[in-house]
Image (cartoon, rainbow, N blue to C red):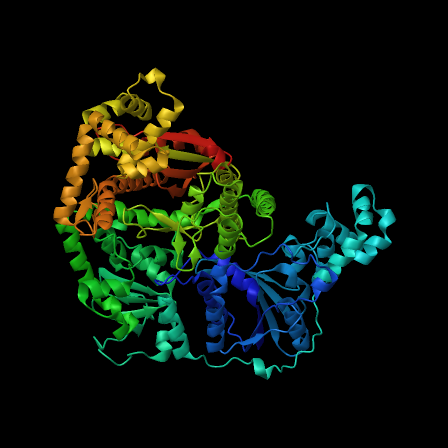
Amino acid sequence: MNLVIIDGYSLIYRCYYGVPFLSTSSNIPTNAIYGFTNILFKIYENVKPDYICIAFDSKKIFRKESFEEYKANRKPMPDELSVQLPYIKDILNAMKINMIEIEGYEADDIIGSISYKFKNEDIKIIIFTGDRDLLQLIDKNISVNIITTKFDKTIDDIYTIDNIKEKFGVHSNQVIDYKALVGDQSDNIPGIKGIGPKTAIKLIEEYCNLDNIYKNIDNISGSVKQKLLENKEDAYLSKNLATIIKDIPINISLEQLRISNWDYMKLYDIFKSLEFKSFIDKINKEIKINEEENKITEKTPEQLSDQDIIKYSNCFSILFDERQDIFYIYDLKKLYITKDINVIEKIISDIKKYIITFDFKKILHKINYNKQLIMSNIFDLMIATYVLDSNRKGYDLENILLTYLNIDLTNINYHQAVLYFNNLKDILEKQLIEYNCFYLFKEIEMPLIYILYIMEKTGVMVDEKSLFEYENEILNKIKDLEDKIFTLAGQTFNINSPKQLASILFENLKLPVIKKTKTGYSTDAEVLEHLIDKHPIIADILDYRMFNKIYTTYCIGLRNSIDNKSSRIHTSFIQTGTATGRLSSTEPNLQNIPIKYPEGKLIRKVFVPQDGFILIDADYSQIELRILAHLSKDENLIKAFINNEDIHLQTASEIFGVQKENVTPLMRSQAKAVNFGIVYGISDFGLSRDLGISVKEANEYIQKYFDRYPKVKEYLDFTIDFAKKNGYVLTLFNRRRYIKDINSSNRNLRQYSERIAMNSPIQGTAADIIKLAMIKIYKQFEKYNLKSRLLLQVHDELLIEAAIEEKENVKEIIKTSMENATQLSVPLIVDCKEGVNWYEAK
């Protein structure tokens, strides 16, 4: 029997900052709701509680009476989170979970009091929280699970009476003494300035608790003694603030906390309104929506009891149902069900077997596959659909079955879907051949699945100490900017509140209104950029937003994603995430590490190699411009690259009409904007805005560019005409992207579509080339049995963790593979750098 107690706001905030931003089609933020609900489901599935409740902080806290600064540095709840709370509480009500809030007390005190009220009962008490404050409650029958979020995954760090000393450094009854010494920045508990975790643990190990430390103060020497004496009052204040109350008179019985049947229809309605399809799937079985309607077949799965299945069939359809954690296997004769991953491994590793599957990378992770694999024997229906149409909103099985076979998965049992895999494969394969993109599917996308799986398993190592130091630097910058902004504004306010910020800017400071929204004055980035020269507060607000994003998105996001055992972050590469063919990254997004600001770039320092290894960063030089030269067949552009000229210097010389030696850095910078702007179909208005020049000047720059490279203009015009006639554009490897509004009567939509049409073949070809390079590099590493491994792909860049003794060989493999991934009319050039961290390598 067990009682689960959940620390409400602690986990909700963790989910808000730990789960990437999500919203409904009507723009209701949902990331906190999604992450928190996912945690609830995991608790029910993994812990199977007999009793459960959740504790929330009250608005007024008694600790503020003794220390006004307690939690004073906590920012008000973001608007994007506060709108999610009602939905969370509706979900808790539908799941029949008791919500407990007591005026004057924090959730910690409620959790402490409930734990100690029932700790002598014959039950185990399991506390779920995001904070380590609750470790002081650990007892014989009380454990604490520290939860971090990683998109739709939860990571548990379990503390018990047996392991807390080893994991945290002190026993549970010493946690408050530890807090008294080191304080707690998040709660604004002062502690003793200058005493860190190592010193605190050493003192506690020697003297047991705070009282004994001061009783033995004469046995302590040096600066530590001085700090203890000077800050004695703060130490005892901190201990008092950190101590959880355990005797609040809570009038509730254990029986009142017993779990009840959920209100599935209410949950269904909530999830439907929030567009949580995966959660709807979880409860569909329970509420039996349309269960008996439109049955397609009477086939039912047999339990797989022996492995003779493998002997008589050469074609298998395999579907992993993660909702029930089982595999369905169809061999064109019988339908089987199994949880035995050894069976799946045996099937997919048999070179005589042909496998039709869906989202094969997920299956590889489930069975933790670690053998060589013949990917030519695998047909992934999800990847095939993506190659055929990269513009689809989703690549879930339900969507694909409905599109190609007109089968509605909501009206059949989930396991029956696997019966249609062979038919679906035949249709998709026929279209791949018809559209001339079977090579793209078979030789690029399919081999890449296994490489991405290995990269995800490997992960990239993070120096947690460096991350912590970087985080503190960013927090200090945020605090400094807050102080400057408040001084300039003449008052304090919530900088993150658009409403309050608008009031300061447009009512108090009387700045000109640039744009209005339905709810008031807009304070978006575009508005602030227009106001940059109107008041010094604007630059500080922009910097504040930048640093705040770095802190919330990267510092917290990365910290919450670190694997506790390996100190590595294991991102997920999404193969079907972009219309251009580029890979995307999530949980966390490591392709979006900031590079625009120097402070953002510094976060790359926290990514480090394993001992005995070094990081190598390989980056294609101007690959999109080189692809443009190849596709356009422009002689002048081709010649410039063949002669290894500085293309931006060359363009500057042409459009400004000066000799190369007279080109200024500003001219070159503006020419660079023109070069890359052309690739992205930039307009004269867009270029004028980017460069801060008149539209007329921008138009002249573009015209001079096309005068120098006339076939570039011809190519871009041809591409737009092709898109208008055919409805799509193609990469060099026949990757197809449909352009929906290319013939729209709406001028803005049409022009936007034309820019997409111009850029997609170039950006898509670049994506195809680096994928080919990754395949070549991986094969070479395997051929020579190297320890070095691919870690990350970030657009035109690869990050490799190379064994030091293999370093020179690896550099040669990388450079050769990338520069010879394909043959263009201009050379592909790769820059390789090495370093002891990603920043140094980049």
Could you tell me how many numbered marks the image carries?
0
Res 241 → quadrant: bottom right
Relative height, residue 164 to residue 813 (above, below): below
Viewed as shown, does residue 148 lie left or right of 588? right
Q: Is residue 639 left or right of residue 185?
A: left
Locate residue 757, reporting x and y percent: 22, 44
Q: Is residue 102 left or right of residue 787?
A: right
* Near-viewer residue (432 or 250): 250
User: Can residue 214 be seen here?
Assistant: yes
- Which part of the image, by quadrant, shows the C terminus? top left
**Considering depth in this image, is 378 or 664 the residue closer to the camera?**
664
What residue is drawn where x is 33% and y is 58%?
A: 346
**Residue 496 visible somewhere in the drawing:** no
Q: Position of residue 156 (x, y in %)?
A: 53, 61
Residue drawn at the location 25% of the way across and 68% of the way down: 417
Would residue 604 be found to the left or right of residue 637 on screen?
right
Image point (31%, 58%), residue name = 359
Q: Position of residue 109 (x, y in %)?
A: 66, 69
Q: Residue at x 37, y 28 (%)?
A: 669
The quarter of the picture where the N terminus appears is bottom right
Rendering coords of residue 473 (x, y %)? 59, 42
Nearest the eye: 117 or 668: 668
